Amino acid sequence: MLSFTTAGESHGRALVAILEGLPAGMPVDLGQIDEELKRRQWGYGRGGRMKIEKDHVEILSGVRHGLTLGSPIALMIENKDWQNWTEVMAVEPRDIAPEKSRRLKRPRPGHVDLPGGQKYDTRDLRNILERASARETTARVACGALAKQLLVAFGTEIRSHVIQLGGIPDLPLELTWDQVAAIPEDAPLRCADLEIQQRMIDSIDQRREDGDTLGGVFEVVVRGLLPGLGSHTAWDLKLDGRLAQAVMSIPAIKAVAIGAGIEASSLPGSEIHDEIAYNNETKEFIRETNRAGGLEGGVTNGEEVRIRGHMKPLSTLRRPLRSVDIDTKQDEPAGFERSDITAVPAAGVVAESMAALVLGAAMRDKFGGDSLGEMRRNFEGYREQLRGY
Amino acid sequence: MLSFTTAGESHGRALVAILEGLPAGMPVDLGQIDEELKRRQWGYGRGGRMKIEKDHVEILSGVRHGLTLGSPIALMIENKDWQNWTEVMAVEPRDIAPEKSRRLKRPRPGHVDLPGGQKYDTRDLRNILERASARETTARVACGALAKQLLVAFGTEIRSHVIQLGGIPDLPLELTWDQVAAIPEDAPLRCADLEIQQRMIDSIDQRREDGDTLGGVFEVVVRGLLPGLGSHTAWDLKLDGRLAQAVMSIPAIKAVAIGAGIEASSLPGSEIHDEIAYNNETKEFIRETNRAGGLEGGVTNGEEVRIRGHMKPLSTLRRPLRSVDIDTKQDEPAGFERSDITAVPAAGVVAESMAALVLGAAMRDKFGGDSLGEMRRNFEGYREQLRGY
Amino acid sequence: MLSFTTAGESHGRALVAILEGLPAGMPVDLGQIDEELKRRQWGYGRGGRMKIEKDHVEILSGVRHGLTLGSPIALMIENKDWQNWTEVMAVEPRDIAPEKSRRLKRPRPGHVDLPGGQKYDTRDLRNILERASARETTARVACGALAKQLLVAFGTEIRSHVIQLGGIPDLPLELTWDQVAAIPEDAPLRCADLEIQQRMIDSIDQRREDGDTLGGVFEVVVRGLLPGLGSHTAWDLKLDGRLAQAVMSIPAIKAVAIGAGIEASSLPGSEIHDEIAYNNETKEFIRETNRAGGLEGGVTNGEEVRIRGHMKPLSTLRRPLRSVDIDTKQDEPAGFERSDITAVPAAGVVAESMAALVLGAAMRDKFGGDSLGEMRRNFEGYREQLRGY
Amino acid sequence: MLSFTTAGESHGRALVAILEGLPAGMPVDLGQIDEELKRRQWGYGRGGRMKIEKDHVEILSGVRHGLTLGSPIALMIENKDWQNWTEVMAVEPRDIAPEKSRRLKRPRPGHVDLPGGQKYDTRDLRNILERASARETTARVACGALAKQLLVAFGTEIRSHVIQLGGIPDLPLELTWDQVAAIPEDAPLRCADLEIQQRMIDSIDQRREDGDTLGGVFEVVVRGLLPGLGSHTAWDLKLDGRLAQAVMSIPAIKAVAIGAGIEASSLPGSEIHDEIAYNNETKEFIRETNRAGGLEGGVTNGEEVRIRGHMKPLSTLRRPLRSVDIDTKQDEPAGFERSDITAVPAAGVVAESMAALVLGAAMRDKFGGDSLGEMRRNFEGYREQLRGY
């Protein structure tokens, strides 16, 4: 089973992750992990932190001479900003003057500051926000980069793009794989439509002036999966549920849809289901439409898996929202932490990673094997079986 | 930890579930479980099966003299229709004439028939559909009914209602707890607005004539949760992700939103976040709005938890979709199984159950305890702690 | 992943289990499951209950026409004795006269009666003993029988035998597979040495007269496993640990050894390790000894897996031990439930089942596959790979 | 739930662990973790590596100003020896001359070298041994040190001692808590009997001359646990099984016993069970003996938990065992890695850690709570409940 665990505070010394379950003998491209980390930091509307951190992963275990060992892979990404926080975030006991403590006591609406403080019974809400920060997703992206390298070895590719931002355009964009794949890595908002992207940028500029923030919708597209990943036999094996959890767990994501999931609820059955055909040349069952987003009954059907994530506007506003001081119980404006205007493209990259980890796990479950060679042999056997079905 | 496992085919002998992790000494209301099963069967637009099955749960273990023992609870719901399927669904080997075998070989688009058949390498797609059928959710509802009884013991109630069906009304309804709670159990579509409900009914009647199906949107509302359930500290502990998986895993659900999750992605931050206030009388932090749907950073904040599920139109149409015969590879209309026109109200009831199971598990994690008395003592201690925060 | 959950009280209506993760298309021999249940009930020194119950499994789901579906398999074994306990063990609330309630309030030393009562805060210790009874292992054996059928499909067989009982003989027997396999199913104590078996029987007869009980040591032997199951890469993947948990979890087992595990701790390294050789004909690496019990670093090495379980004498004595009345706190003899003099052969059968479930899970993890055919193809590919290593 | 994951190769850059589930607000004593690491390195008969490594833990996350945050704790222990292995163990691709590669191709009997190489399909067995090395237990001990700090906060202490080494004395020592607690930390073999310890030392000296190794038996003793941890209700909740897995998973452990588990199998029931009494002053149920090792039915009964681990002699002998070259298939002596003569005291320290992690998890399950204060309040409530039972 492919699984991962992350650790690390936003201004602590490092983010750490342990990824277990990759087959042995798989080539690891270290530079490509850093590329993914860079993609996560990219995007018009990001704040100052993104300029401080040029994330770089260090692999502490599980890889030798460029190949996985089959043992757990420990990854570490140092927080370059930590040097400014050594006292505030020290592991050891410290006496810090209150004015230097950076204590947070005016919880920010939309963040977990207040319920987290109540739950863990702490009166410095920094103890909550440091872990709740979206910086944690850096560790997910590092793990996801490895999962992607596994998927690529089996012909599967993953992309994401922004299909709506701050309500622009009115309806989310609907684009083909080729259109998505053509988006250059330095596109300011990872949007395929240049004219719309410019309108999004203008909107971000406006919100920046207002001290406000914006959300939006991204789509993850996965191409090249065989039919038969996931299972309908138990509620927690269904891939749609697993993907929904994985994407909803990304900070600020408040809705997840598979394929045309939102629109589908308004249409009659005759207009929404993807009819089945057979391609005599490739010996494959195919669909001419893909409103199901590649999943039927929680199982891949061979079409592109498409997942949409709806992100709320970021909860840290420069023009703060109303809040309460947890000591005095008086109304006070919420505390402020450096933040972005929007981060929808970055959330899409995180969602690619989460999708890669979920789909990689489904591949490991189905094909087993302890080395890449063994897994590939099993995979090829199944592909041949499908041709004869 | 509260967990459950289900088993059972749609036309097999019985559905079975094992629920583990309820505290000992909890009163069990058997009649109320059957009530929930009845609620799941209810709804305008259901087909003939609902008239055959009057589901009744039998508890085979884990409860004695009306109280839980703390040991696993086995639940069984016999399929009354099984008597018509004893040969077709026999456990033992059988030779059945092809014309009586009820073999399915023309997969229904939107169902897992085809990818399931490919995955499990079976040429009778009945081997797939029998487990993939939404009848499996009966077992979930039985488990969920017990989880609800746990929640009620801690002052938490759960309701669901239909807020859009087949695109009616244009925008999903937004209603208060009191409006939702006032919906009578025999409301044909569990919709609080009678005029709109009638329009939904008319639309169902129209689709029935067309041999078509309809989807829609339901909302689950949970009232009376303390702040601090779930955790932001790990991606898989976040309650929003867990609820998203639980609801997305219900057959035909293709999108899940928390609170105003879909709309939120189009609005600026200043308009979407729920500002914080303090009630000096109750010693509680409160919000005057609840667009977050009761969850911030994956943790309950004390407001109502609100989850929306978007259901696609059912995949079995009386006027069948185009498909392929898996033997001949020729185009053929999809097979037909008895089905409904719509089942959105029922899906809402299933989602109540899934939410109750996820939230009950979060309660068990936070409050521990092996008897109801011990759990309650721990709960009350935390409630007192919150008042002093 | 192969996993199972059991439910059921000793005098409740039924024992229930759900087994998940068998591949689809696997033939299921129902009679063979009942055979295993009979083997569990067998053995010289058993009490009256064994005559009442002739256990018979009913499969409620997951199998159709003699083949697994890939969906969860629900198994039920009715407690024939239940008809005598319908009131005492009723699920519904009951008012029962104290003299008919069969309440237990004098906990039996060695059983979980007292710590269970304290934990679950119940004053009728029957609420504990009913689940803690070794009758629960019936459900494990039913699941284990299916796991064995999986293993047999891959050439793996499992046997158990009694190698010491009540200290007879002085040192546990050391026997070959052939000697163990030759033990007839109706051997009174599943012991390969007839003369020693008779001495064991005499000892049981003596203890019966004394109102006392006996323990002993069994060994499980597994033949035909390929090298490479389990993993050294994480503590909880190691098969030795998993097998130890599985066997130690059987009631009354207080020690578990792999191979010559106990003796090994007294010998120097030069005398205990199994040296490696190569068989040029079969292209296999082999060992001429097997003190390691087939596991090195938690991974199978291709030799027989051998696990020993040490069982304490049963805790329910006809001549009761000293205890305390939980109401009066006065010294009183422990309560009495019908029990056996010894059950070591039965514990061996349960341990076979637990081993089959653990090893079956390791097979599923390594070879993956959703149908028996796919799993076999993957298995054969690995076997071929081993030949070329 | 308290859980942990480790990563790291023996000569890689670092060992890493992530520990999840400690309550927030718990004081962390960093020096005490290093003390435990030192205890693990201690012991007469250890080899040269122990002089190279003075292990020191660094906490990378989850602790701030000396208190836990409730978020995952990442721990790192650098391998000081790594500087000598930067090329051989490089993460990045390397071309290394064969004579400098330190490739292992003659598998060592008793190690996982060969089955691991077959499983992961690698021809350099160093890829296996680096992870399989007992050095991995350093990370377990670091996690275990934190679990111990949790237990101490609830009045629970853990010790271990060596009760037999290389067959000396004939029967394992039986000692009281006070005798065990009195063993000084610098006792060469952590044995309470000085005369016997000297005989053990002499035996080690003899084996060193012979190029041989020795095993032995340690006992872990845990004092101060309340009754009611663990559960009899499901096989995988039973603490005896969980402890057995945890201890058996330590390298070279081949047998595990709870209390007098091995001897118990030879004695009649009347002589082995611990009769129950009641102490009117403390309002506690007590036992005058503790042959059960503090566990009945997988649940703590309030007596000391005692676990014995049987360790085989180490598998790396200076006078190598017979093996086979995996390239040539010719008989060759096994490869040699620097190793110890014996490591039983160290294994006892690792077992303390594993026991602390298992028991800490059982405490978290029962008492819940997100802060140390909340957990303590729940704990005290249960203690009061027990007094009234």
Image (tube, coloured by chain):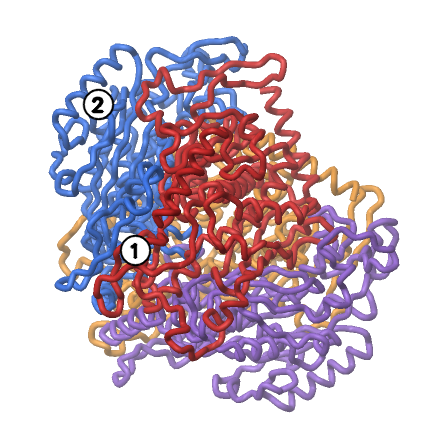
Chain colours: A orange, B purple, C red, D blue
Q: Would you place residue D240 above or below residue A218 in this image?
A: above
Displayed quadrant of residue B386: bottom left
Displayed quadrant of residue D166: top left
Q: Would you place residue B240 above or below residue D301 in this image?
A: below
Helix, strand or loop at label 1? It is helix
Question: Mark 2 belongs to which subunit?
Answer: D
For marks 2 and 1 on the same chain, the one whose residue lies earlier in the sequence: 2
Say what amino acid the circle numbered 2 marks: Lys
Q: Which mark is residue D51?
A: 2
The structure residue drawn at horizontal position 63% and vertical position 51%, both measured from the top left corner, is A180
Residue in front for this viewpoint, B269 or A115: A115
**Which is closer to the viewer, label 2 or label 1?**
1
Say what amino acid the circle numbered 1 marks: Met
| Quadrant position of the C terminus of chain B in the picture | bottom left
Q: Residues within 10 Å of mark 2 (few under 14, many from 20)?
A: few
Looking at the image, do the residues carrying marks 2 and 1 touch, with CB atoms under 8 Å apart? no
Helix, strand or loop at label 2? It is helix
Q: Which mark is residue A158?
A: none
| Quadrant position of the N terminus of chain B in the picture | bottom left
Residue in front for this viewpoint, C102 or B174: C102
Q: Would you say D45 lies left or right of C264 here?
A: left
Q: Would you say C364 lies left or right of C256 here?
A: right
Q: Position of residue C177 (x, y in %)?
A: 54, 27
The structure residue drawn at horizontal position 61% and vertical position 72%, both measured from the top left corner, is B347
Q: How many marks?
A: 2
Can residue A215 be seen here? no
Q: Which residue is mark 1?
A: D363
